[in-house]
C-alpha cells in the first residue's frame, strides 16, 4: 500500500511539473514574439503619407542693385561749421533753408545761452521720431554699424527742425546783437534732401559697369551736423524726381526669362519692405546685360543708399503642392503619337502580327498615361498579358504603311498614391519647385486630386506594395 501511495504521489508531481513547464514555455514564446514585433516595428523605415493640398510657391532671387536717380550734389558756398534744418530723406520746397553755416563757431554756445529757443515737441513730432527709431531697430544689423551714426545725425537734424530755431523771425536780430557770423543756405529747387554723397550722382543707366557693384570699392560720405567744412566741399544732394530705378547684373538665362516679365514685386531684405516696379532688360556700354526696375515709390526710404539688396518675387505659381521626396521616376513605352488612332472613342494602335496565315493587323486598346508634342506614353505591361502591347510588338500606320517596334522607353515623374491601401503610380506635371516642394498641374490624366494620400518618401516603397495607414 505504501508503495502504491508513493507511486501515485510521484505521478502527480510529474504531471504538475509538466503542466508548469508547458505554460511557462508558451508564455516565453509569446513574450519573445512581442519583443521581436516591437523591435521590428521600431527599427524599420516608417512609411508616412502626405495629404495632397492646393498651394503655391513664390520664387525669389536675391540681387545687389545700383540705385540711379535724378539727383544733384550741392557744394558749400563758404567755409564754416554746418547745422541742418531738414531731416535726411525729407522733401523741401524751393528757396527753403536747408542748413546754416556758422563762420564764428559760436552757434552751439548761442543756443545754450538762449533756452527759450527750445520748445516742447508736439505729439506728431514725437510720433515721427518714434516711428523712425522703430523702423531703424527692425532693419539694423551689426555688420552695418555705420547706420547707427546715420540715424543719430538724422535725429539731430530733426531736433533742429522741430525747434523754433529754424523758424524764429527774430533770430537774425539776436545774432547781430551777439556779433555772431552765420549764413542760412536755401535750396534753389524742390526735392528730397539726403546728406549722403558718393560721387555717383550723375551716373545714368548706360554708364553702369560691373565694378560699381563691388561693396569693397564703394565709398560714401555723410556730412554730419557740427562738422567743419571747407568752401566747395559737398554738403548734401537734392533728388529732384520721385522716379528712380535699380540696375542689377543678370545672366543669359535670366535675361531670357526677364524679357517676358513686365511688372515685378520686390522685397528689400535689409529694410523688410516690399514694393513693385516695371522690369526691363538692356545692354550697357561695358557690353554686359543688366536688368532695370523702374519705381516711383519708397524714394525717401532709400535716398541715401546706392547699393541695395533686394529679391525679385518673379513667380507665384499655384496648383497642387507635394513634397520633393514623394517624387519617383517610372519608365514608359514611347510611341510616336501619329500612330495613335481611335475606334468607337477608344484610343489604341494597329498591332501587326505575323502568323502561319500571313500578316494580320488588329486594333489593340492601350492605356495611355500622357501625350506630348511627339510621343504617347504607354504603361509597361506584364509580358504574359497578351491583351496589352509589350516589347517587340510591331505597330502599323495605315496612311503611310510605316511600322514602329515597341521597345524604347522614357521616364515620367510621378508619385505613389495609396488611397486604396497599396502603391499606385500617378503621374505629375511640375510647373514650379523649390528645395522642399513642387507645384504640379491639376486635373491631369492619371494624376492627383486634392486630399489624395501619397507616400511621403517614395524611396521606401515599390509599386503595388501594401501600405497600412
Image: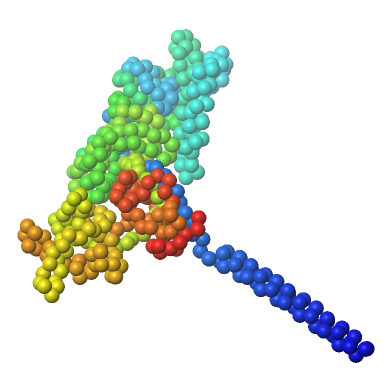
Is residue 356 shown left or right of residue 456? left
Considering depth in this image, is 292 or 3 the residue closer to the camera? Answer: 3
> Quick check: 437 left or right of 348?
right
Which of the 4 quarters of the picture holds residue 404?
bottom left
* Quarter in which the N terminus is drawn: bottom right
Residue 307 percent across, percent down from the top left: 35, 40
Q: Residue at the location (22% across, 46% down)?
A: 256
Residue 453, percent across and down? 44, 51
Whether residue 386 is visible: yes
Q: Nearer the viewer, residue 177 or 213?
A: 213
Q: How is the image coloured?
A: rainbow
Q: Is residue 63 left or right of residue 356?
A: right
In terms of depth relative to the viewer, which is nearer, 167 or 363?
363
Q: Residue furthest left?
A: 400
Foreground residue among 441 and 268? 441
Residue 63 versus residue 404 in the image, above or below: above
Q: Residue at point 70% right, 76% down?
A: 25
Tell how many labels. Answer: 0
Q: In the rendered view, would you say 79 is above or below 253?
A: above
Q: Position of residue 243 (x, y in %)?
A: 29, 28
Q: Residue furthest bottom?
A: 3
Residue at horizontal 46%, vertical 42%?
A: 144
Residue 395 seen in the current view: no
Residue 280 in picture, x, y percent from top left: 23, 38
- Farthest-out residue, front: 1
Quarter-of-image position of residue 320: top left
Query: Residue visible at 43% across and 59% down?
Result: 422
Amino acid at each position: 500500500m505504501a508503495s502504491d501511495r508513493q507511486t501515485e504521489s510521484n505521478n502527480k508531481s510529474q504531471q504538475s511539473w509538466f503542466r508548469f513547464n508547458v505554460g511557462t514555455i508558451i508564455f516565453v514564446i509569446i513574450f519573445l514574439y512581442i519583443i521581436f514585433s516591437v523591435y521590428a516595428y521600431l527599427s524599420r523605415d516608417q512609411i508616412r503619407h502626405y495629404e495632397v493640398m492646393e498651394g503655391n510657391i513664390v520664387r525669389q532671387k536675391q540681387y545687389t542693385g545700383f540705385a540711379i536717380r535724378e539727383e544733384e550734389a550741392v557744394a558749400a558756398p563758404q567755409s564754416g561749421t554746418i547745422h541742418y534744418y531738414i531731416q535726411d530723406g525729407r522733401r523741401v520746397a524751393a528757396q527753403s533753408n536747408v542748413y546754416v553755416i556758422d563762420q564764428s563757431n559760436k552757434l552751439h554756445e548761442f543756443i545754450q545761452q538762449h533756452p527759450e529757443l527750445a520748445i516742447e515737441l508736439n505729439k506728431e513730432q514725437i510720433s515721427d521720431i518714434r516711428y523712425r527709431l522703430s523702423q531703424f531697430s527692425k532693419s539694423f544689423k551689426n555688420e552695418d554699424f555705420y547706420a547707427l551714426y546715420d540715424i543719430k545725425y538724422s535725429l539731430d537734424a530733426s531736433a533742429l527742425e522741430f525747434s523754433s530755431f529754424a523758424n524764429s523771425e527774430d533770430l537774425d536780430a539776436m545774432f547781430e546783437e551777439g556779433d555772431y557770423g552765420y549764413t542760412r543756405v536755401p535750396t534753389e529747387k524742390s526735392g528730397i534732401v539726403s546728406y549722403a554723397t558718393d560721387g555717383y550722382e550723375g551716373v545714368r543707366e548706360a554708364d553702369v559697369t560691373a565694378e560699381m557693384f563691388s561693396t569693397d570699392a564703394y565709398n560714401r560720405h555723410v556730412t554730419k551736423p557740427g562738422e567743419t567744412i571747407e568752401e566747395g566741399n559737398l554738403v548734401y544732394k537734392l533728388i529732384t524726381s520721385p522716379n528712380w530705378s535699380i540696375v542689377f547684373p543678370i545672366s543669359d538665362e535670366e535675361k531670357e526669362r526677364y524679357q517676358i516679365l513686365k511688372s515685378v514685386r520686390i522685397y528689400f531684405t535689409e529694410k523688410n519692405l516690399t514694393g513693385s516696379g516695371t522690369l526691363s532688360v538692356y545692354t550697357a556700354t561695358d557690353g554686359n546685360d543688366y536688368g532695370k526696375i523702374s519705381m516711383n515709390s519708397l524714394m525717401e526710404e532709400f535716398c541715401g543708399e546706392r547699393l541695395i539688396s533686394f529679391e525679385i518675387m518673379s513667380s507665384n505659381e499655384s496648383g497642387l503642392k507635394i513634397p520633393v521626396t514623394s517624387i519617383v521616376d517610372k519608365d514608359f513605352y514611347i510611341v510616336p503619337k501619329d500612330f495613335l488612332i481611335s475606334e468607337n472613342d477608344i484610343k489604341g494602335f494597329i498591332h501587326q502580327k505575323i502568323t502561319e496565315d500571313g500578316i494580320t493587323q488588329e486594333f489593340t486598346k492601350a492605356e495611355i498615361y500622357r501625350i506630348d508634342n511627339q510621343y504617347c506614353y504607354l504603361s509597361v505591361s506584364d509580358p504574359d498579358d497578351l491583351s496589352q502591347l509589350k516589347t517587340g510588338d510591331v505597330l502599323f500606320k495605315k496612311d503611310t504603311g510605316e511600322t514602329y517596334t515597341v521597345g524604347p522607353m522614357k521616364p515620367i515623374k510621378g508619385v505613389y498614391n495609396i488611397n486604396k491601401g497599396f502603391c499606385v503610380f500617378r503621374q505629375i506635371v511640375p510647373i514650379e519647385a523649390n528645395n522642399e516642394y513642387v507645384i504640379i498641374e491639376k486635373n491631369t490624366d492619371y494624376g492627383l486630386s486634392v486630399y489624395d494620400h501619397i507616400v511621403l518618401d517614395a524611396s521606401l516603397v515599390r509599386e503595388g506594395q501594401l501600405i497600412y495607414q
